Image: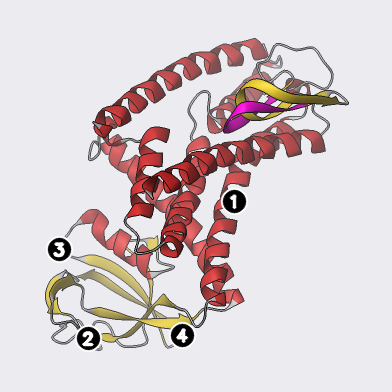
Amino acid sequence: MSVFYILIGILMFGVLIAVHEAGHFSVSKLFHIKVNEFSIGMGPAVWQKKKGETAYSFRAFPVGGFCAIEGEDGKSDDPGAFTKKPIWQRVCVLLAGSGANLLTGFIIALCLYLGYCAAGDYMVPTARLAGFMEGCPYEGADGLLTGDRIVSVNGWRVNSTRDFSLFMSLDGGETVDLVLRRDGKRVKLEDYPLQLREYTDEAGNTVLKYGLLFDRETLTLGVALREAWYDCAYYARVVWVSLKYLISGRAGINDLSGPVGIVKTIGEVGAQSANVGEGLANVFGLIAFIAVNLAVMNLLPIPALDGGHIFSMLVFWLIGKLIRRQPSPKIEGYIHTAGLVLLLGLMAFVMFNDIRKLF
């Protein structure tokens, strides 16, 4: 059964890349920027048709695609080239890829919630306190009360119980700064000693919890839209926290995963589920996370990524304004070519590491 989920993972990984390129393509066409080719898949072409100035093709391997925009390397004098367009249009084209991935993640999350809604009454947890576990010491007028809504933890906005768990686990300090919404008013609890403690759950098991019970509400269309957006925000925050850990040294390069590791994880998540329905829901939830992950990562100011293109483009534009002469776009192309070589080297290392972990 894991092979089934692995095949879904491979296909969906390709779809996410194709969707990313489709975002670039659609906005390029909107601004009349010349697109030489838009391809679904990679490798040799199995079908191709040219319409206007663009060749549309399907290629042999269903793992992504590409959008070949005229002049994106800075080496074209065509009036419809990327570099000949106003900077705000070029920024929109570059943002469109990540925007398409973010929208895909949102749609997948929304479809999952609508599926739960169609299956019957489904309750989603909120950040509002419904009560406390037996023996919890945090209930009181100078602490937490039933009905309080947790607004933020250590300055991080809390939209859901997942946000609360994530931000409580980050610093690992003995105290935490909380902001609550109580009877319409904001209440601040600074250096509050909220810690994990041992409690007994309903099954009689000893568990480590904060002792807080959260309210739940019935899933409706409006709630589904809200929760899908909260999910995307949560996924983006997880990526941000992971990057912070990587930069600070709390996580290493060996902790990174590429396509091989991601597909392996998708297969494991599906295979460990109780049934096919639950497996598909878990796998598509993971795919929504990957879609948002791709959106965020592509906006990092790293050469060869969309965010790197935006950053360098704005820097070169500013330099041009200061010296009253626009630097050659070829220089920017060389920078991104060098960045692409380094990025491909990193991807090769991560892929080798993923394959090594398989054995």
**Dominant secondary structure, magenta:** strand
At label 2, which amino acid type do we have? Answer: Glu
Which is more toward the observer, 81 or 117? Answer: 117
For marks 4 and 1, give the one nearer the viewer. 1
Q: Amino acid at mark 4?
A: Gly
Task: Tell me if 116 is positioned left or right of 328 in this view.
Answer: left
Q: How far across and down, in percent of the image, does residue 168 sit?
A: 27, 62
Closer mark to the observer between disc 3 and disc 1 = 1
Q: Which residue is mark 2?
A: 139
Q: How far is the residue under mark 3 from the one under mark 4?
A: 29 Å
Provide residue 288's location: percent of width, then percent of height. 50, 52
Q: Does residue 213 appear left or right of residue 221 in this picture?
A: left
Q: Which residue is mark 1?
A: 104
Q: Earlier in the sequence, mark 2 or mark 3?
A: 2
Q: What is the secondary structure assignment of the residue under circle 4?
A: loop
Q: Earlier in the sequence, mark 3 or mark 1?
A: 1
Check if residue 252 falls in the magenta segment.
no
Give the mark, 2 or 1, whose residue is nearer the N terminus.
Answer: 1
Residue type (three-letter) at the residue carrying disc 3: Glu
SS label for mark 3? loop
Image point (66%, 24%), residue name: 317
Q: CA distance from mark 3 to mark 1?
A: 39 Å
Residue that mark 4 sits on: 184
- Spatial distance from mark 2 to mark 1, Cα to Cα? 41 Å
Q: Position of residue 79 (x, y in %)?
A: 84, 19
* Residue at image point 19% right, 57% down: 172
